Image (cartoon, rainbow, N blue to C red):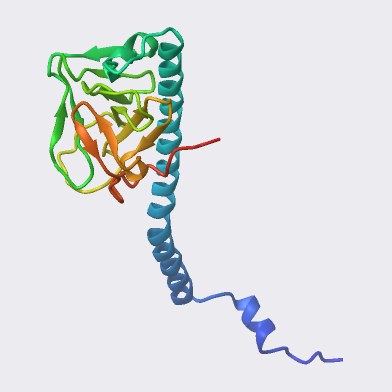
Amino acid sequence: MLQKKRTGCLSRFRQGFSLTELLIVLGLLGLFGALTVPTLFFTRTSNDQSAQANSVIKSLSFAYLTAKTNGLVDENFRAVDLMPQLNYVNVDTGGVTQMEGYQFTDSELTCSSTRPCLTLHDGSRLMLESYSFNGTANNNAIQVLYDVDATYSGSSVDGPSKTVGFFIYYDGRISTRDNCDNPTCTSAGCSSPVSDSDPVWFTGIDRD
């Protein structure tokens, strides 16, 4: 008995896709990848850097608690006085090292004897500001600046190189400029929260 020749979808399936159709599919996949991969990569990098910064925050918190427990903290205490309690591989006080400035500025922060920079074991860098608490109220603070990749890009564009500032309060709390107390006071004066002042890579302080 003669079998009837099948046509339609089955025949189309056996023949496969044409070269033009394959090229269209590959082009769409390439376009999708070009749109999504940079975003996914930046999100992962940002999360890694934020976790790195939170590890440094924990080290700062422990260093401050140690200094306070040892009776070293008073209204004249400065961020630079945390150095004996911090773990680092190098310190620059001679103006050789430059740190990235805050977001939306292309200025650099130069390390000095009054603003020493500590290179940490993970390659990131801390600048210890010279301001003291200038009081013992809960909103009196000292300031530390953190550069997660320890590079100076010379760009004003917000990104992974930009520095984030941490306030360490007399009562041991730590905040950024985004959500600091109003007012937050150091020996240099008082400041208020500045919305969106934290760099885009920093997703916030882990309170766990």
Query: Residue 101 in the image: x percent, y percent?
Result: 20, 36
Q: Is residue 148 visible?
A: no
Apparent side of residue 6 relative to residue 148 in the rendered image (left or right): right
> Residue at coordinates 42% horizontally, 14% vertically from top-left?
68
Apparent side of residue 149 relative to residue 65 in the rendered image (left or right): left
Q: Most extreme residue toward the right, as rendered?
A: 1
> Residue at coordinates 14% horizontally, 39% vertically from top-left?
154
> Residue at coordinates 45% horizontally, 42% vertically from top-left?
47
Q: Which residue is nearer to you in this view: 110 or 62?
A: 62
Q: Which residue is nearer to you in this view: 23 or 6?
A: 23
Query: Residue 80 in the image: x percent, y percent?
Result: 27, 16
Q: Which residue is nearer to you in this view: 156 or 31?
A: 156
User: In the picture shown, does residue 195 fall above or below 125?
Assistant: below
Apparent side of residue 160 relative to residue 64 in the rendered image (left or right): left
Q: Which quadrant holds residue 1? A: bottom right
Q: Which residue is nearer to you in this view: 168 or 25?
A: 168
Query: Residue 19 in the image: x percent, y percent?
Result: 46, 73
User: In the picture shown, does residue 113 fall above or below 1?
Assistant: above
Query: Residue 100 in the image: x percent, y percent?
Result: 21, 34
Q: Is residue 20 visible?
A: yes
> Residue at coordinates 38% horizontally, 36% vertically from top-left?
175
Quadrant in which the C terminus is drawn? top right
Q: Which quadrant holds residue 111? A: top left
User: In the picture shown, does residue 165 fall above or below 26?
Assistant: above
User: In the picture shown, does residue 121 fall above or below 70?
Assistant: below
Q: Which quadrant holds residue 153? A: top left
